[in-house]
């Protein structure tokens, strides 16, 4: 299963969890120069926002050999987004314990189902996720707020 085929079930899962998802046609560059000076921008695979103005980013991958590269991207996303996930096809999904340590969620995706293997989103019982993360770089709430406004402008047009 290629990466693009995983996007639709992930988007449906996000929407079912109360997240407004940016359309595929509206790729949004996110500035990372302040934390990674050799590059100006990167583009999230999937980005959405919650009612609470928290940003959610999902990096989609199909190759387990690229886990370190994907984790690196997710660590950058953690500086601008409250909830960050890596998504793999169900048949390739492996629970890497280090993801929990870094506060990165894990999604197992099939054509019609998404399982949150490492949970990040708050449950119905609590309004906050139970982070067990070791933060390497704290989230920049002002930057997240700007990104949220940018996504809202696109979604609400």
Image (cartoon, rainbow, N blue to C red):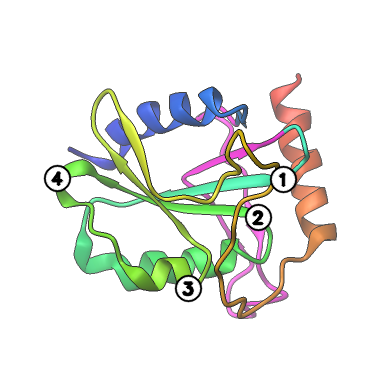
CA–CA distance in space, label 4 to label 1: 30 Å
Residue contact between numbered discs 1 and 2, judged by CB atoms under 8 Å: yes
User: Does the stretch in magenta take in 31?
Assistant: yes
Left or right? Give the position of 55 relative to 44: right
- Please tell me which of labels 1 and 2 falls first in the chain: 1
Badge 2 vs badge 4, beta-carbon distance below 8 Å: no
| Residue placed under numbered mark 3 in the picture | 101
Which quadrant is home to the N terminus? top left
- Residue 115 location (% of width, % of height): 34, 38
Q: Mark 4 points at which residue?
A: 91
Among all residues in the image, which is located at the extreme front? 125
Which secondary structure lies at badge 3?
Answer: helix
Residue annotated with mark 1? 54
Spatial CA span between label 2 and label 4: 27 Å
Q: What stretch is highlighted in magenta?
A: 22-50
Name which residue lies at 62% across and 44% down. 28
Secondary structure of the residue carrying tag 2 is loop
Q: Position of residue 142 (x, y in %)?
A: 85, 59
Is residue 72 depicted above or below 116 in this figure?
below
Q: Are marks 3 and 4 in contact (CB under 8 Å)?
A: no
């Amino acid at each position: 299963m290629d990466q693009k085929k995983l996007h639709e079930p992930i988007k449906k899962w996000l929407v079912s969890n109360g997240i407004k998802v940016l359309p595929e046609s509206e790729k949004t560059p996110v500035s990372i120069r302040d934390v990674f000076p050799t590059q100006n921008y990167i583009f999230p695979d999937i980005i959405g926002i919650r009612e609470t103005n928290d940003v959610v980013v999902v990096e989609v991958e199909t190759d387990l050999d690229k886990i370190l590269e994907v984790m690196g991207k997710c660590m950058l996303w953690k500086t601008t987004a409250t909830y960050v996930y890596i998504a793999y096809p169900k048949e390739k999904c492996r629970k890497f314990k280090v993801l929990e340590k870094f506060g990165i969620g894990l999604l197992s995706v099939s054509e019609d189902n998404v399982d949150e293997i490492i949970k990040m989103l708050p449950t119905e019982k609590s309004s906050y996720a139970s982070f067990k993360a070791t933060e390497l770089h704290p989230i920049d709430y002002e930057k997240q707020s700007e990104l949220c406004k940018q996504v809202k402008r696109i979604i609400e047009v």
